[in-house]
Amino acid sequence: MPQDDKTPARDERYDPQRVETKWSEQWQQDPALYAAELNSTKPKYYVLEMLPYPSGALHMGHVRNYSIGDALARYMWMNGYNVLHPMGWDSFGLPAENAAIKNNTPPREWTLSNIANMKAQMKRLGFAYDWSREVTTCLPDYYRWNQWFFIKLFDQGLAYRKKSKVNWCPKCATVLANEQVVGGYCWRHEDTLVEQRELEQWFLRTTKYAEELLRDLDKLEGWPEKVRTMQRNWIGRSEGALVDFDLGGTVGPAGSTITVFTTRIDTIFGATSVQLAPEHPLVADMTANNADLRAKVETLIAEQRKAREAGDIGEIEKHGIFTGRYAKNPFNHEALPIWVANYILMDYGTGAIMSVPAHDERDYEFAKKYKLPVRVVIIPTGGESDETVMDPPLPFASDDGLVVNSGQFSGLNSPEALKAMADFAEKNGFGKATVTFRLKDWGVSRQRYWGTPIPMLYCAKDGIVAVPEKDLPVLLPEHVDITLTGASPLANVPEFVNATCPKCGGPARRETDTMDTFVDSSWYFYRYTNAHNDRAPFDSNEIAYWFPIDQYIGGVEHAILHLIYSRFWTKFMRDLGLVKNDEPVERLFTQGMVIKDGAKMSKNLGNVVSPDEMVARYGADAARLYSLFAAPPDRDLDWKDSGIEGIHRFLGRVYRFIMRHANSAHESMVETGLAPSPEARQIQRKLHQTMKRVTDDFKGRWHFNTCIAAIMELVNELYGVEEKIAQGAVPAALLARVQRDLVLLLAPFAPYLAHELWETLGGKGSLLRAPWPKYDPALAKEEEIEIPVQINGKLRSRIVVPADVDEPFVKERAFADEKVITAMAGKQLVKWIYVPAKLVNIVLR
RNA sequence: GCGAAAGUGGCGGAAUUGGCAGACGCACCAGACUUAGGAUCUGGCGGGGAAACCCGUGGGGGUUCGAGUCCCCCCUUUCGCACCA
């Protein structure tokens, strides 16, 4: 190659299409990376990305997600781990049904064809998945095990049917779980308000595990704190007490006592009113014969609904109405006025509170407004004699004060009083200590066609009866009119609805609701270990080996959906004896979103960057590499089309360098010790430094952007000394080593190019079997270092010294420096600071 | 309102422990090569200044020989929670 002409010849041009087509075919036949074995002698590593649902198209957000997982899987594999990296598809009901209506295509066909598309795209992108363990949650095979689990849940009393107020999305035309309502709106339709409807629905008793779900969060140290906090808030545990306030007679069907929930029973002697939620059943009783009062309460209800819909329930002005009635405080027998207030929520606690203005901010505000009495019963600890202490600034909400004016409990501190008073209430039969949770049971009924049928039958004689295991799976009928009208479309299919009771043989009606698709994703990652098992959902021995998942990668949007449900499912399976692990996922990584033009990539905005187009223009490697390079993976990535061109150029530079020098380097020559020439040493050092940086980042914080930057630096360095290489200044063995290691470093990020170049370099065997390159810290070390010299903290000069020098030598050199001499003229040396091998600071006055 | 994260060139972002701010890339500018280039190579690229130098990490204070990094106050953005009794 002539020195003066670095224009690549035609055959030196990097053509990603050719390279990627060639290798994607070969990989399908090479099981190396897909050969995860049970009980291998190698350490196991289960890496998983969250399921995509088959909407038909991948976008760059997916590519980024899978690029992270794939890089990790390849890295762990190269480091000798037995890697499980499976891939599957989530059944997502709504898009399938919408598409069915729009295109008149059955959901099954629509889903399967989209899965085929996505699978082809994934393969084209070169992700190393174990396709033999593919799981598709919307196929009969999976339905069968969903139903099997559902019956187990039912047998355990963890699945039950109940009529209650539920969330209803008019656009989805189905019920939603609490977790699927975001600020009053549907999680799938950000502009659609969720309505409340009174319906009979199936629930899963997630609250049985509320305590454990909360407690075990502390063990999940490999999870982002943010997700743990979100789950803690969602579970919303609070300790308190229930106390009955007597109405002195029945008002109506709701009875004659008001049960309030309080976390501060120690303040009960300071209660000056009782507050009810407008929707409290007793309010209905009290207003039954009072139209005027009823109307006012209706206004309060309307206000609450409006505020809830607007998402600012915390903002509405507190106000209320006196009902004209009184309830007796069981501790001091005082008659307290009963109010109805717009800030009391029916769905928390009991929907009734005791109002203690002196010790609660909201109560204080309310009492001021309506001139209700304020009575201090808690004072700061420190002495009853002190005037200012006896009269603390109100409201005084401290929870470790001293109880006063509280009969026999006076003199206790708050924590003692909490216990003593709850005990007292319990002993006297008007209350008890209790724990409430914000977490509610999981509503799993959906009025959709496309979902797992709930395997239950209704018999006039035997009531609710589970479908016998031998009759599973209950399959969806083929021809169904999907209307999204509200009732399940399955209800219109008599062949489906009409069944026989397995107990009495009489006629039975089949449940027509289907399961929430989050049931599917609650355990899909277990099924991967035994994707084709037709006798059980999985083999417990496999689970014992592979679980918990070592690394799970997905978006934070699942923090309180999928990630709570799947934890619940694991605990339920553990109690059934199916699995031994308490938690499904050891480490969780939440990657950032891909943003385009300042907005989340979405079809509605029309700003979706198609991976197909990127792959066609720049290749899969470039698309993947860019998605990792442009930002650290945990941060949002602002997609710029121009950015990928730089990556494309970089890959071309790597390709051309190796095409030019592969022949002059022979691996057979053994590289020993320090390289002879300065140029050679320079390359050698840079190589080992780069290997160190990339390795450290894989072990540490996964800032793949800086890994890739480091590899780019290495390549720039190689180009910088290319003329010297051509002149033979670099030994062939070193040149071979550099190229080989460069290719290995690139393998987790750009596997296609890496494979091609590995072959070009005559690498032994497939790159899939090559180990991760090891760096030598001694060779990574600099021999000479440049030390900045500061004077009074400002950079004034630099001195070059051998790397292993001692302080006196540096000091001597520094004071010999011309700039330093000039600066010191007429000044006095105050201090000499030397940070070994880092910096010199000379303080003058 | 409470809590968390973040704020660095024209842009995306580096700087892991208090120690040379701006790695790497994009965009831009100049040059080389070329019949040609959606190609390649080389160099430049925070602001001011002819230069010496000065200024510079959202703003204001502080600690320190030394602060993007630590402390205090404030501003902005994003996310989470929000009458939770």
Image (tube, coloured by chain):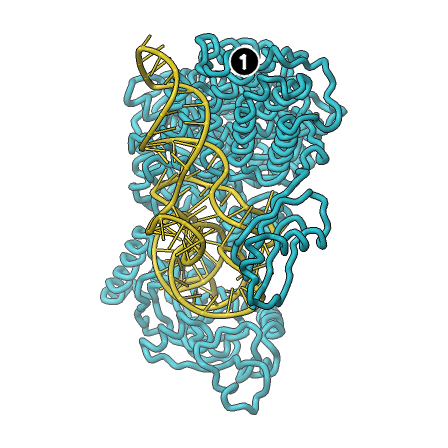
Colour of chain A, in one word, is cyan
* Location of residue A433 (image quadrant): bottom right
A680 versus A732 height, above or below: below
Q: At label 1, which amino acid type do we have?
A: Met
User: What is the number of callouts on the image?
Assistant: 1
At label 1, counting other C-alpha atoms closer than 10 Å, the crowd grade (few under 14, some 14-19, many 20 or more) is some
Using residue A718 as the reference point, say whether residue A191 is left or right of it. left
**Chain for mark 1?**
A
Residue A288 in view of the camera: yes
Where does label 1 land, which residue?
A: A659
Residue A63 x %, y %: 46, 27
Identify which residue is drawn at 55% across, 33% down: A710
* Location of residue A646 (image quadrant): top left
SS at mark 1? helix
Please state which of residues B85 and A66 is positioned toward the viewer in this rendering.
A66
Residue A182 x %, y %: 38, 45
Colour of chain B, in one word, is yellow
A400 versus A752 height, above or below: below
Identify which residue is drawn at 52% across, 11% down: A1
Residue A551 x %, y %: 60, 35
A498 versus A544 height, above or below: above
Please state which of residues A804 and A145 is positioned toward the viewer in this rendering.
A804
Residue A536 in view of the camera: no
Q: Quadrant of the C terminus of chain A?
A: bottom right
Residue A586 x %, y %: 63, 39
